[in-house]
Image (tube, rainbow, N blue to C red):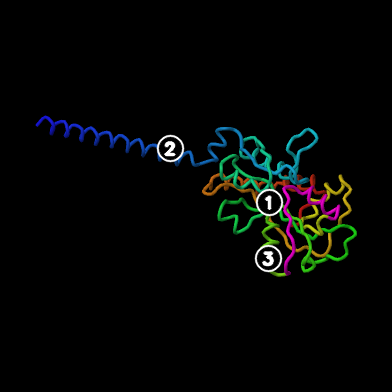
Amino acid sequence: MMKRKLAGLTLATLTSLSLVLSACGGGGSNSGTASANELEQIKKDGVIKVGTMGTYPPYTFLNEQKEVDGFDPDIAKEIAKRIGVKAEFTTQEFSGLIPSLQAKKFDVVVSQVTITDERKKQIDFTDGYITNEVKIIVNENNNDITKLEDFKGKKVGVGLGTNDETYLRTEVLPKVGDFDIKTYDDVITSLKDLDAGRIDATINNLYALKPIVDENGFKIKAVGEPIKSDEAGIALRKDNAELQEAMNKALADMKSDGTYDTIFKKWFGEAPSK
């Protein structure tokens, strides 16, 4: 009889404990939902953490004071200001930016991340904030390459993990035949190789190349018509609607009040095309 009473007591105790834990679990779940609103957390902290390359002038680079500077950081700073926080930057190679974003090392990536359907499977984007035309770039003495079909049998450099790399592998290679793709972690190294004749061509946009060419005196040129145009957006983690909406509003307001044009002219010397 005593054993039955103890068993009954134990069962009752376990049942009560289970109910308490369930209640705590429910509260934890609600708390998790609340904390999932990253915009609220960013405002509470007063800082939005931004990932960027820092090696891609005039878009993103380290200035003489070793501060993160450029078009992308200026866009990020202005958006942060309109949200009511400050922007804090972390620089790393482009190929690691999206994995680091997903690992929550920063809140967003502002680093010329091209909006693609493939990337949308992993991350979300704001509305596009810049459109870039991509051209073929060759050594000044190279007259053999003027179009994509001329890549056949050549060595072509491209940024590792970029949309341009995907474009070469999935669209250009099947179309024009075999050529060697060499990947780089930064633009300046690819241009050094192009200048020295270690690769035959690269693809990029002229806004990105001009400051590097001017500073280093590379003997290179753009040839032919633009092969494609890319739209870059600010990358953020999935299911982050509040932050996405706030950033889209900030971008729209920047464009309507002229701030965006001012930033664009500062870095590219001309007004953005409408």
Q: Residues within 10 Å of mark 1 (few under 14, many from 20)?
A: some
Q: Which residue is mark 3?
A: 171
* Percent position of residue 87, x then y: 65, 37
Membership of 153 in magenta stretch: no
The secondary element bearing badge 1 is classed as strand
Question: Residues at badges 2 and 3 in contact (C-beta under 8 Å)?
Answer: no
Q: On screen, 229 above or below 27?
A: below
Left or right of 145? Residue 239 is left
Question: How many numbered marks have been drawn onto this rendered protein structure?
Answer: 3
Q: Amino acid at mark 1?
A: Tyr
Left or right of 274? Residue 144 is right
Of 92 and 214, the residue lying toward us: 92
Which span is picked out in magenta?
Answer: 176-197
Q: Residue at x 70, y 46 (%)?
A: 257
What separation in Å lies between label 2 and label 3 (alpha carbons)?
46 Å
Q: Find residue 47 and report its image quarter.
A: top right
Of 257 and 122, the residue lying toward us: 122
Q: Amino acid at mark 3?
A: Glu
Q: Quadrant of the N terminus?
A: top left
* Percent position of residue 247, x then y: 61, 45
Q: Which residue is mark 2?
A: 31
What separation in Å lies between label 1 and label 2 (alpha carbons)?
34 Å
What separation in Å lies between label 1 and label 3 (alpha carbons)?
25 Å
